[in-house]
């Protein structure tokens, strides 16, 4: 009798173990929440909704995009930081979060340590462009012009402490250039005033500039990013400008995924694998280009190398240019 009970207990234990294994393999078995820390319509939101749609199809579960804007993205990030580490709450991470890491001293968490990286997926290439009245056609000529008239020229960007602002300040500091920053609330008004000639130079995202560059009402001078863009393939990068001091220049405007710190390794690997699978789907790349975005697929280790390097770049530039958030 005792032997029979022992066998029953063994069978029950085996069934429990199998049940737990099945449940682990079934992740996710309920909807996943993807937190976007900006308002609907921007590049972060577009990336989130495209990946939510495709991940939902892979998982046969809903992926709910939840926009939680505020404090430059810190409110939504804090929500994910405090979420259970079970894979059901994810952050649509951007390099704006790394700027916050540098400029907000009391966030309560560290973007470079306190989240689980799951990979980068897209980028929104940025570039420097000029009004056609400015007698330059490349970055060498623009640099010479700005150096010849310290403080004479102004440049527009999409906001204070935006990646576009930092790119310009890093360029200015490297080349010892004096030019006045005029921040706008968004790339569209910054480009509009550059078209009108109220400002001669603008640092903005490709979608805001491309239509005007194609018809000659703006000159696309150089991309801030690490590689050329399929959206404007003839525009060189800053590193390709032939200026020795800028040969290693790169600043990418990227979007990816993070989870709360301490995600179980099996869940983190599944998320990473499925996110990468979606990123490399040819239909994903087609839809990204239609939205003015590009594939920027980096694995979690590569993601953290870039994030930590950018944290150093942003911190240095913030100190040099006295960049602060209001």
Image: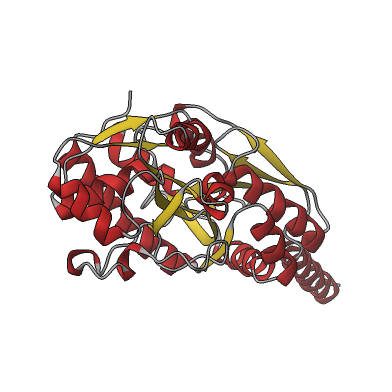
Color theme of the render: secondary structure
Query: x, y percentage for residue 81?
Result: 49, 41
Query: x, y percentage for residue 146?
Result: 20, 47
Q: Residue at x 16, y 41 (%)?
A: 178
In the picture, measured across the screen, residue 298 lies left or right of residue 164, that is: right
* Residue 110 shows in the view: no
Count of marks placed on residues: 0
In the picture, measured across the screen, residue 173 lies left or right of residue 154, that is: left
Give the answer, above or below, for where 120 lies relative to 67. Answer: below
Give the answer, above or below, for where 309 lies relative to 14. Answer: above
Q: Residue at x 46, y 28 (%)?
A: 185
Residue 100 lies in what quarter of the image?
top left
Quadrant where the N terminus sits is: bottom right
Q: Nearer the viewer, residue 171 or 272?
A: 171
Q: Residue at x 35, y 39 (%)?
A: 200
In the picture, measured across the screen, residue 243 lies left or right of residue 118, that is: left
Q: Residue at x 45, y 31 (%)?
A: 193
Residue 275 lies in what quarter of the image?
bottom right
Q: Nearer the viewer, residue 5 or 297?
A: 297
* Residue 305 shows in the view: yes
In the picture, measured across the screen, residue 182 lies left or right of residue 124, that is: left
Give the answer, above or below, for where 35 lies relative to 8. Answer: above
Query: x, y percentage for residue 106?
Result: 30, 31
Query: x, y percentage for residue 198?
Result: 38, 29
Residue furthest to the top: 326
Quadrant where the C terminus sits is: top left
Give the answer, above or below, for where 277 lies relative to 170. Answer: below
């Amino acid at each position: 009798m005792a032997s029979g009970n022992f066998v029953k207990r063994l069978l029950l234990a085996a069934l429990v173990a199998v049940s737990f294994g099945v449940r682990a393999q079934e992740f996710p078995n309920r909807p996943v929440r993807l937190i976007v820390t900006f308002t609907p319509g921007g590049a972060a939101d577009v990336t989130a909704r495209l990946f939510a749609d495709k991940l939902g199809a892979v998982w046969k579960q809903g992926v709910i995009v939840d926009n939680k804007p505020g404090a430059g993205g810190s409110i939504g990030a804090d929500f994910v930081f405090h979420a259970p580490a079970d894979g059901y709450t994810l952050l649509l991470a951007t390099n704006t979060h790394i700027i916050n890491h540098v400029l907000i001293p009391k966030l309560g968490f560290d973007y470079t340590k306190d989240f689980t990286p799951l990979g980068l997926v897209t980028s929104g290439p940025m570039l420097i462009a000029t009004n056609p009245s400015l007698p330059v056609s490349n970055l060498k000529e623009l640099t010479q012009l700005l150096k010849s008239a310290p403080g004479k020229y102004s440049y527009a960007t999409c906001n204070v402490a935006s990646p576009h602002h930092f790119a310009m300040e890093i360029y200015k500091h490297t080349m010892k250039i004096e030019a006045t920053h005029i921040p706008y609330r968004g790339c569209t008004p910054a480009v509009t005033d550059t078209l009108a000639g109220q400002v001669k130079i603008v640092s903005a995202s490709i979608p805001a500039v491309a239509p005007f560059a194609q018809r000659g009402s703006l000159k696309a001078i150089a991309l801030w990013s690490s590689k050329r863009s399929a959206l404007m393939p003839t525009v060189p990068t800053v590193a390709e400008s032939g200026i020795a001091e800028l040969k290693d220049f790169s600043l990418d405007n990227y979007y990816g995924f993070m989870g709360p710190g301490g995600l179980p390794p099996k869940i983190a690997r599944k998320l990473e694998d499925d996110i990468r699978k979606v990123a490399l789907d040819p239909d994903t790349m087609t839809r990204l280009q239609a939205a003015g975005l590009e594939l920027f697929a980096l694995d979690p280790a590569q993601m953290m190398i870039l994030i930590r390097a950018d944290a150093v770049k942003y911190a240095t530039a913030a100190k040099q240019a006295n960049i602060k958030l209001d």
